[in-house]
Amino acid sequence: MSERATVKLEEVKNIGDAGDSCLDAQKTPEEPVCEMLKNIKVALNCGDRQSLKVALGKLEIWKNGRDDQSVHDYWRNEEVCFKALVIINKMLLVCREKFSACIIATSVLDPLLEKVHHWLLVSMRLVNMLLEVVKSLLMCGQDEAFNYAIQIISKLSDSLGSEHKESAAFTEENQLYSGSHLFIFYERLVKSIGPDTNCHECALYWTHGRSIKDLLCECLDQPYLFIYCSWPQCGVHNGMPQTFFHKCGACLFVRYCSRQCQINHWEAGHNLRCKALANRKSD
């Protein structure tokens, strides 16, 4: 066995993801929720449902053991909020009926919702991402998810009331003026949750009968989601399309931008990880 092949598995960091585009998570490694969110992102990108279930369980335990103020502190940064909303949106698309109740039970969206009016003034991308999360909740076809989506829309409606229409949030520069793409999206969401609509009818309206796989592919094509080369010393991403990366043929868990990166990662310890993953899949 070569010297490189004896490298301990622990030394190969972020297997399945060469890093995280959230700089705030890298700056505060002592905060456990940052690592949990990165693990959830990796599990989603790789389609590993078991790892996703474990990560969601850890997130739930962490939330139950912390006071509300600590969660408020974590969501203080706009970039962290945005990345978290992206991850939550992907979780809802992946899990839908099976895990959506668990996701909602974590209440990770509640502290973000308290800042809705502030977002309207400073960050249209956060508002847009929150609307995407609402749409994903409506696609779950569950009463609990449906009711939670209505709560979010209600809070948005309060912020979009007539008393705020003179604010900077409704200028063309911020793209929330009446008739803008973002405002039209918001109005469609409001109309889809009418008093005579149930959760199943609403889900059918937004999914158009498409499968979970189709919905996920659409989500992964969005420009603010990145897939990384799994060789830690490479870290290629730069918004390259998903088709640029190739999965390991044995475990189907990690992705590489080139054959050389795959060889490097294999020799650095992925050979051991790969066998473990392959054995778990066959059990």
Image: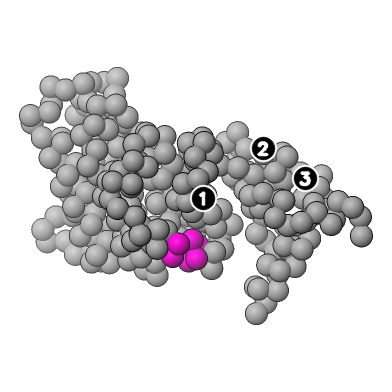
Q: Horizontal and vertical percent for residue 267?
A: 83, 53
Q: Is residue 72 visible?
A: yes
Location of mark 2 (residue): 236
Magenta segment includes 55: yes
Q: Are marks 1 and 2 in contact (CB under 8 Å)?
A: no
Quarter of the picture containing the N terminus is bottom right
Magenta segment includes 95: no
Mark 2 Cα-neighbour bin, 10 Å: few <14, some 14–19, many ≥20 = many
The residue furthest left is 163
* Nearer to us: label 3 or label 1: 1
- Secondary structure found at label 2: loop
Q: Are marks 3 and 2 in contact (CB under 8 Å)?
A: yes
Q: Is residue 125 left or right of residue 261?
A: left
Location of mark 1 (residue): 35
Location of mark 3 (residue): 261
Mark 3 Cα-neighbour bin, 10 Å: few <14, some 14–19, many ≥20 = some
Mark 1 Cα-neighbour bin, 10 Å: few <14, some 14–19, many ≥20 = some
Q: Nearer the viewer, residue 122 or 269?
A: 269
- Which residue does the image show at 84% across and 57% down from the upper left? 6
- Answer above or below: position of 48 versus 23: below
